[in-house]
Amino acid sequence: MKIMKFGGGCLKNDESFLQVAKIIASEKDRPFVVVSAINGMTDLLLESVLNAQKGEKNISGAIGDIKEKHRAIVEKAITDQAIRKEIYQKMETMIEKVGKLLTGISYTGEITPAVRSHVLSYGERLSALILSGVLRSKSMDSVPIESDKIGMVTDKNLENATVILNEFRNNFRPAVQSLSNNKIIPVITGFFGCTSEGKISTFGRNGSDYSAAVIAFATSASELEIWKDVDGFMSADPKIVKNAHKIERLSYYEAAELSYFGAKILHPRTLEPLMGLDISVRIKNLFDPEGRGTEILPEAHEKDDIIKSVTYNRGIAVVRIHGPGVGYKPGIIAQIGHLLSACGINIYSILTSQTCINLLVDKKDASSSYEALKEMKGGVIDEINLEKDVTLIAVVGEGLLKKKGLAARIFTAVSKENVNVKMISTGASEVASYFVVHQDDTEKVVNAVHREFLE
Ligand code: ASP
Ligand code: MG
């Protein structure tokens, strides 16, 4: 079985919906389809939530906007009148519910993660409904499926949820059987599931990729296609590297490292449900369906010159925790982890020495990390500093640890640009080497590494 996931960039207007339908129709066997919300809808819903909190008067404009954007697609992409009418009615019912949720927010003046997730989930509910209607009007049997109604159970982390994979697989099995027996194409909502108490939980922005992987896991799919409006993973960001080129093939680990640290192609957690399985993942471009995209496979494949991509992340900050004895203090890392996780702060990476613990955190969490940790000052810790004007550079390729002289080549290339490297981590990952530089040096460094290995 093949899972085909279409992102917001593929769901922009009537034409792109029809292009998606054409691609699905050209499949030999009926695939399972997973969708994001239409382009820009999640942002619009998020904005509506914030505006509703400011006052009830803002709601009707938002609802009108949401309705209009979807209607414009349905009107042109669904040619069968009876189906169009049915979809309009179902859309109305859904959008009415969004209105009620927004009204609730305006009355209570409160935005909870549960209500925010619930409102946002309507972006995907609406796009799944519409795409399924488009497929039917092109004579394909299809049903929209809302992921909370098929037992996609998650943990209680409502805005960065994790699916309980085996439970979901068991819940979904009967539906999978009957859909495949009857040759029906399900169009399943990405981005959200629900907790065991029935609260809607979301997977973080761009989380539909993760949903698609979860569905690939649960259906024991052989293939997962992630359709986008770009060709695939690139050797570097083409916005800053002129000679960047598409990457043909990556391993799961390489793709995961690239996604975690900057490449905005896949949601960072997409590969998680697939680890240990043998599912071929392919990134495909909606506007070049014959193109090969980037293939992501479980097994490693070493390139002669090892390095496949250099990526960067301007969104991180370094928290430096100084103290002469930090290297000897048992439990100190646990204490730091505990204080930060209590504030919902994620640590990307930890680098320690005997006198300093360095944490990489999201830039937006930098100040709250400082606040959370400052109670530790005075004991073994005497100072905590933040560095926010930094960029994390990641150099990725299978075999990187085994290849002699690679680090020397990376840092020679960087030092020729007269750039100071503030911090280095090599060896923590088998396929990636990281370092931190001043943010103003980002372009220079990425280009230097790209020239050395990839041009
Ligand atoms: N619609 C959600 C978002 O924009 C999820 C996704 O696109 O994958 O973040
Ligand atoms: Mg999106």
Image: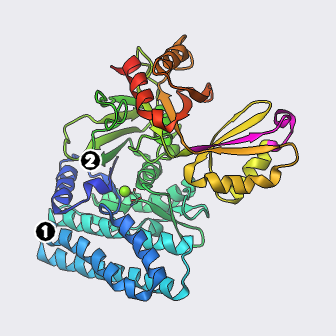
Q: For the point 79% across and 49% down, which residue is it? A: 335
- Vertical placement of residue 33 versus 198, above or below: above
What is the tally of numbered marks visible in this picture?
A: 2
Q: Position of residue 182 (x, y in %)?
A: 29, 60
Label 2 Cα neighbours within 10 Å, binned few <14 / some 14-19 / many ≥20: some
Dot 2: what SS?
loop
Do residues under tags 2 and 1 come within 8 Å of each other at their CB atoms?
no
Q: Nearer the viewer, residue 251 or 325?
A: 325
Tell me the magenta residue range.
Answer: 317-332
Q: Secondary structure at mark 1?
A: helix
**Disc 1: which residue:** 76
2 or 1: mark nearer the eye:
2
The quarter in which the C terminus is drawn is: top left
Q: Residue at (32%, 38%) from the top-left corner?
A: 239
Q: Nearer the viewer, residue 77 or 50?
A: 50
Q: Amino acid at mark 1?
A: Lys
The answer to whether the beta carbon of the residue marked 2 is less than 8 Å from any atom of ligand 2 is no
Question: Residue 291, percent across and down?
Answer: 22, 36
**What kind of residue is marked 2?**
Asp
Magenta segment includes 319? yes
Q: Is residue 176 above or below residue 380?
A: below
Can you say whether 88 is above or below 343 in the image? Answer: below
The residue at the point 80 percent across, 30 percent down is 354
The reply to whether residue 6 is visible in this rendering is yes
Asked whether residue 124 is in view, the answer is no
List x then y, in percent, for residue 405. 54, 11
Residue 121 part of the magenta-drawn span: no
> For the residue carrying disc 1, how many other residues have a C-alpha within 10 Å: few (<14), some (14-19), or many (20+)?
some
Give the label on residue 229, or none: 2
Residue 339: image tag: none
Ligand 2, seen in the image, is in the quarter at bottom left
